[in-house]
Amino acid sequence: MASESDPDPWSKDKKDKFESKSRSEWFDPCQEAAARSIACLRRNDGDRSMCQDYFQAYRDCKKNWTTRRREERGKEGKLF
């Protein structure tokens, strides 16, 4: 369920992978939470009301990731 999501989407290994990828390469540290959301939709024949916990876990992961990334970039003196 939602509690299975990675508690730290900006862990050192994910940060290193994100920072070392090419600009054209896509990387989402919350991909596991997204995959669980999609799997829930498939299990429940597209009934979104049955998957709200999974959707919230994905939103929380993305919010945590963007906040942590913004904070670290601010410490480095980078705006974007």
Image: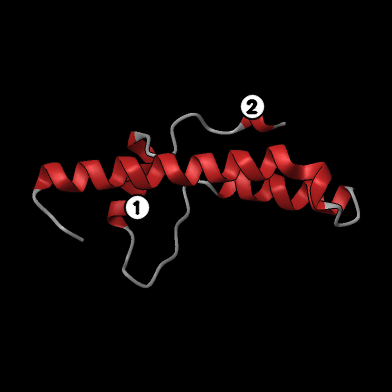
Residue 46: x and y in percent read 85, 57
For disc 2, the marked residue is 3
Label 1 amino acid? Answer: Phe
Foreground: 19 or 38?
A: 38
Between 20 and 8, the one nearer to me in the picture: 8
Determine the secondary structure under disc 1. helix
Viewed as shown, does residue 44 lie left or right of 56?
Answer: right
* Residue under numbered circle 1: 18
Q: Quadrant of the N terminus?
A: top right
Q: Nearer the viewer, mark 1 or mark 2?
A: 2
Q: Can you name the residue that lies furthest to the right here?
A: 45
Sequence-wise first label, 1 or 2:
2
7 with respect to 69 (left or right): right
Residue 28 placed where, x, y %?
48, 54
Whole-percent x and y of residue 5?
Answer: 59, 33
Q: Residue at x 11, y 46 (%)?
A: 76
Which one is in front, 59 or 21?
A: 59
Q: Which numbered circle lies on residue 80?
A: none
Say which residue appears at 86% left-offset and 52% top-offset: 47
Between 16 and 79, the one lying in front of the other is 79
Q: Tell me which residue sits at (8%, 50%) in the image.
A: 77
SS label for mark 2: helix
- For marks 1 and 2, give the CA distance: 24 Å
Q: Is residue 17 left or right of 42 when viewed as pictured? A: left
The spot of residue 10 in percent (x, y) is: 37, 39
- Say above or below: 7 vs 47: above
Quadrant of the image for the C terminus?
bottom left
